[in-house]
Image: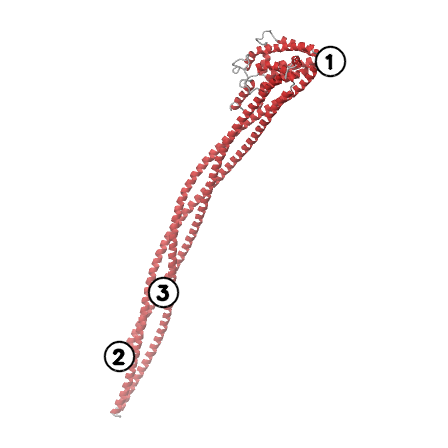
Amino acid sequence: MSKKLSLEERLSLATKKGRKKNKRSTSNLSSPSPAILSNSEQEINSASFDDPTAGLESNDDAENGDDAVRLQNTEESNTHKLITTAVESTAHIDLDKADNSEGTIVPLPQWLPKNFLELSVDELVKQISPEYQRLNQQIDDLTNELNKKSQIETRDSSFFKLVKEKDDLIDQLKKEGTKLAETELRQSNQIKALRAKIKDLEYDVSALSEDSAQNVDNFNELQSLYHNLQGQLAEATDKLKDTDKQRDLLETFERKIEEKDGLIKSLQQSLDDVEKLLEKERTEFQMEKKALQEATIDQVTALETKLEQLRIELDNSNQISNGKSSRDDGVDNDENGSEVKQHTSSQYNLLKEQLESSKANWNSIEYALNIKIVDLENHLTSTRKEKTRFEEAYQTALDSSETLSEQLEREKENHLNAASQVKELERQIETLKLSLQSVNDDYNLLKKKYDIQRAQLEKNDDNSKPHQENSVGKVIEKTPSELTNSLNSMNGNIEDEWILPQENSMLSLSISKLEELEDDSSMKPIGNGSHDTLGSEETQRFSRKNVDFSIDDIPEEAADLQAIQEGKSLKSLNNTSIPYRRASAQLSNSNGHISAQLVNKLSTELRRLEGELTTSRESYNNLLSEKAKANDEILRLLEENDKFNEVNKQKDELLRKVEQIQSQLETSLQLLGEKTEQVEELENDVSDLKEMMHEQVQQMVEIQEKMR
C-alpha cells in the first residue's frame, strides 16, 4: 500500500509527524527558560541512572507510544522508519566517534564544568540539563526548517534514491558498529578473564614458591642430616681402619698359629717316630731280655750240671783215689790228679770268660738304655715348654678374638643405623623428587595456558586493528559526497559539546575506573562478569538515553538532504573522514597500549616463573647429586658390610682352628703322658733287669768262689 502512495503524500505525512513530535516535545518542557529541568524529566533521568530497569521501562513506554502513532498509517510508519534508521545511524556514528576518539586530545566544551570528574552522575546531569534543553530547541528549529524545505521540494525524485542509499549505508554502519561493539566487549571480557587468570597464576606461583621454600627447608634439613651422617661415616671409617689393623694382626696370629700347627704336626710326627722306635727297641729289649734269661738259665743249668758232674766226679775220684791208694802206686795217683785239675781249671777259665763277656754285654746294653732315657727326658721337657708357649699364644688369640668380636658387633650396629638413615634419606629424596615433578608439571601447565591466552590475545589484537580500520575506511568510502555538509553541520555542534579528550572523555573515565576497580584486588571478586556486563549495559543505556532525543526528529534529514542537493565539494568529505580515521587510530592505539601492558605484565610473570623454574631445577639437580653421593656412600657401606661379614667368617674359622689346635694339644699332651708312663715302666723294667743281672752275677761269683 505504501508503494502506491506518491512522494508528495509521503512528505506531507512526514511533516505532520514531525509537527506532532515538536508539539509533544515542547509540551513536555515546563518553562521556556533552559535553566532547570522539569520534575518528571529529572525523575526519568535519575531513574535511568540509578535503575537500569526503570530506563528500560521508560524507553519501552516511549516506544509503545511511537508504535501507537505509527499504526495510524502504514505509509507514514514506513517513511518514518527510513528516516529514523538514518538518524539512528548518524547518532551511532557520533557515538562511535565519541568512543573512538579516546586516543585524541580534544578541548573541553565550554558548557562542561571544570570539576566534572569530582561530581556525581546526578549532579552532572543537573548541570548539563540546560545545555540539553538548548540542544533540543536547536533541533526543533532545525526540524521546522527541514519541514518547510521538504514541503517545497516534494517533487524531487533524487530524495528517495538518496534516502535508500543512506538507509543502506546506515544499516551497514549499524551492523559494523554492532560488530565493533561486540568485538570490543569480547576483548574487554577476554582482558578481564586474562587478568583473573593472571591473579590465579600469581596465587599458584605463590603457592609454588611456598612449596619450593618448604622443599628448600627440607633440603637444608637433609643436608644437615647428611653432614651428620658424613661425620658418623668418618668415625665408622676410622673404626674400620682400626678393625683392618686388628684383622692384619689377627692374620699374623693366624700365620703364627699355622706355623705352630705345622711345628706341632712335625713334633707329633717325630713323637710318633720316637714312639715307634721306642716300641721297636722295647720289643727288641724284651726279646733280648728273654734270650738272655733263657741263655742265663741254660748256662746256669749247664753250670749246675757241670758243677754237679764235677762234684760227682770229684767224689768218685776221691773215692777211687782213696780205694786205690792202698793198692796202687803213688805215681799213678799223681798223674790222674793232675789231669783232673787241668780239666777243671780249663772249665773254670771258660766259665770265667763267659761271665766277663756277659758282663760286658750287659754294661753296653745298660749304657744304650741310659742314653735313650736321657734323650726321651730331654724331648719331653722341650715338648712341655712348647705346650706352655702354645697355651699362652692360644690364650692371647682368644682374647684378641673376643675384642675383635665385640668391635665387630659395634660396627654392625653402627652399619645398621647408617643403613636405616640412608634409607630414610632415599625416601625423603623420592618425596622431594615427586613434589618437584608435580611443581614442574604445574608450572608447565600454567605456562601452556599462558602461551595459549597470550596467542589468543595477540590474535584478537591483530584481528581487531585491521577490522576497525577497514570498517572506518568503508564508512568513509561509501559515504556520498553530498552527505558531508549535513555531517559537518551536525558534528560541528555535537563534537564541540560531547567529544571529550582522552583523559576526560566518558569512555576513558569508565575504562580508567574499571581498570582501577579491576586492579584493586579487594574490590574485585572472582565472579564479577555479571556485574561488568550490567555496568556496560547501564552505560550503553545511559548514552542511548542521551541521544534518543534526536531519533524521533525525522525532519532534520530534510535539511541534510537540502544541503546535499546544494552541492558541496569533496573537501568536506575529507574533513569528516579525519575524525573517523583519528578515532580509529586512537582506538587501535589504546587497544595496543592495553595489550602491550598486558603482554609486559605477562612477560614479567613469565620471566619470574622461569627464574623460579631455574632455581627449582638447580635445587633438583643438587638433590640428584646429593642422592648420587648418598648412593655411593650406601654402596661403600655395603662393601664394608661385606668385608665385615668376611672378617666374621674368618674369625669363626680361626676360632674353629684354635679349637682344633687345642684339641690336638690335648691329645698330644695325653700321648706325652702315656709316653712318660711307658718310659717310666721301661725304666722300672731296666732297673729290675739290672738288679736281676747283679744278683745273677753275684750268684755266679759266689758259685765260683765256692768252687775255688
Q: Choose between 336 and 478: the one closer to the eye.
A: 478
Residue type at mark 3: give it.
Lys
Q: Give the color scheme: rainbow, by chain, secondary structure or one colour.
A: secondary structure
| Nearest to viewer (mark 1 / mark 2) | 1
Q: Quadrant of residue 308?
A: bottom left
Report if the CB atoms under discs 1 and 2 are less than 8 Å apart.
no
| Nearest to viewer (mark 3 / mark 1) | 1
Looking at marks 1 and 2 on the same chain, the residue that comes earlier in the sequence is marked by 1
Q: Choose between 551 and 499: the one closer to the eye.
A: 499
Residue drawn at x 44%, y 37% is 221
Question: Percent from the top left, x then y, of residue 138?
Answer: 61, 10
Q: Quadrant of residue 413?
A: top left
Question: Percent from the top left, x then y, of residue 409?
Answer: 41, 48
Q: Which residue is mark 3?
A: 675
Marker disc for residue 705? 2
The correct choice, above or below, for 693 with respect to 88 in the image is below
**Which type of secondary structure does the marked residue at label 1 adopt?**
loop
Looking at marks 2 and 3 on the same chain, the residue that comes earlier in the sequence is marked by 3
Residue type at mark 1: give it.
Ser
Residue type at mark 2: give it.
Glu
Quadrant showing the N terminus: top right
| Nearest to viewer (mark 2 / mark 3) | 3
Query: Can I make out residue 21 in this image?
Result: no
Q: Which residue is mark 1?
A: 6
Looking at marks 3 and 1 on the same chain, the residue that comes earlier in the sequence is marked by 1
Mark 1 → mark 2, Cα distance in angstroms: 208 Å
